[in-house]
Image (cartoon, rainbow, N blue to C red):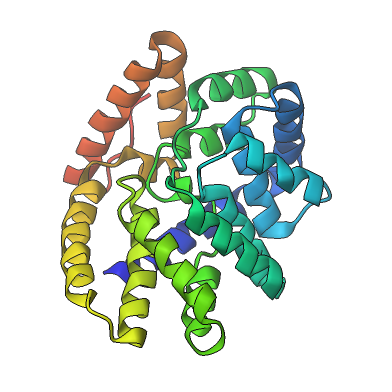
Amino acid sequence: MLAHALHVFEDELLIVNSEYSLTQASKEVSLLNYHQQYPTNQLAYLHLLKQCAINEPSYCSESFYRKADALFPNNGAPDFIRATIAAKNNNQAQFERLIESAAEKTAFDFKSFDYNDYFIHSYTSVNDIPIGYAALNSQGYVAAMAVPNPTHVIEQCEQAFDQNLSLHESCYILASTMSRSGGEMIVQAIGLKIEENYFQQTGKPGLDEVYAQKQQFEQSLDKMHQLNGMTLSLVDEQFVEGWLSRGLKGGELAAQAYAIEESKRLSLDQNYHPCL
C-alpha cells in the first residue's frame, strides 16, 4: 500500500506535467514575476524550486537556493527538494550536506503557505490555469509534496548503510521527523519507508512500531482518498474553475467547503463530474 501511494504520487505528477507542458514556459515566467514582486512568499518560491528539481531552468542557481535558508529557517522541506536535485545530478557531497541540514530541522511542512493570496493574485493577473493548479494543489495530498521523484532520496539513504553510516543516521533522523510530522500524508509515507529500510538494515528495535504506524497510515490513506477533493483537482479542470469561483466570491472557507462536498460526491460515484 505504501509503495502504491508513492507510485500514485509520481504517476499523477506525470499527468499534470504532460497535460500542461505547453504552458510550462509561461507558468515559470509568471511564477518568477510573482517571486520578484513578493520575494518572501513561500509558496511561490517552493513551486519555483520544484521546477529546479524537474528540469533545472536557468534561474536555478546557488543564490536562488540560498534564499531558502531565510524563508524556511526551521523547515526541512526545501532541503529535501534540493537533495533530490543533488541526487539526480550525482552530487554526493551536496546531497549529504542537504540531508544533514534537513535532519536538523524540527518541522517538515509543505502546506504552511499563504496560498490564497498568491493564488488569487496570480490567477487574476495572468489568467493562467496551471498556476491555479499549483496553488490549489498546495493544500492537497499528492502535489503538495512538490518533489518529482522522492525515490532518489529513499534509494540514496538505503545505500548509505554500506557507504556512509553518518549519512545513514541523518537519514533516520530526517525520516523520524517526516513520519511523525502530522502533515501531508506523502511526507509521512516517505518517512515511514526510510525508517522501515533503516530498521531492516540495522536490526535495531523499532520495526514493529513502524509497521504499526504504516497500518494506521494506510487506514487514514483510505479515508483520505474518499474525501480528498484535491486529488480530483489534478485531473478535472472544471473542479478548478468551481473552486476558484467560490474562492473569489466567498473566500477561502467557501472554496474549502466546495472541495469537501464535491469530493464526497466523487467518493460515491467515480463517474461524477464537479458542478460549476
In the picture provided, is 47 more to the left or to the right than 4? right
Q: Nearer the viewer, residue 126 or 169?
A: 169
Task: Identify the image quadrant of residue 275.
Answer: top left
- The answer to whether residue 34 shows anywhere in this view is yes
Q: Nearer the viewer, residue 225 or 149?
A: 149
The quadrant in which residue 264 appears is top left
Choose top left, top right, bottom left or bottom right for residue 175: bottom left
Front residue of 268/68: it is 68
Determine the residue located farthest toward the bottom in the rendered image. 162
Image x and y of residue 15, in percent: 52, 56
Which quadrant: the N terminus?
A: bottom left
Q: Position of residue 160 (x, y in %)?
A: 52, 81
The residue most toward the top is 249
**Image quadrant for the C terminus?**
top left
Determine the residue positioned at 23% across, 29% down: 261
In the rendered image, residue 273, in percent from the top left (x then y), is placed at 33, 38
Q: What residue is shown at x 61% (from left), y 69% (from top)?
A: 96
In this rendering, the answer to whether 50 lies above or below 262 is below
Q: Is residue 150 left or right of residue 35?
A: left
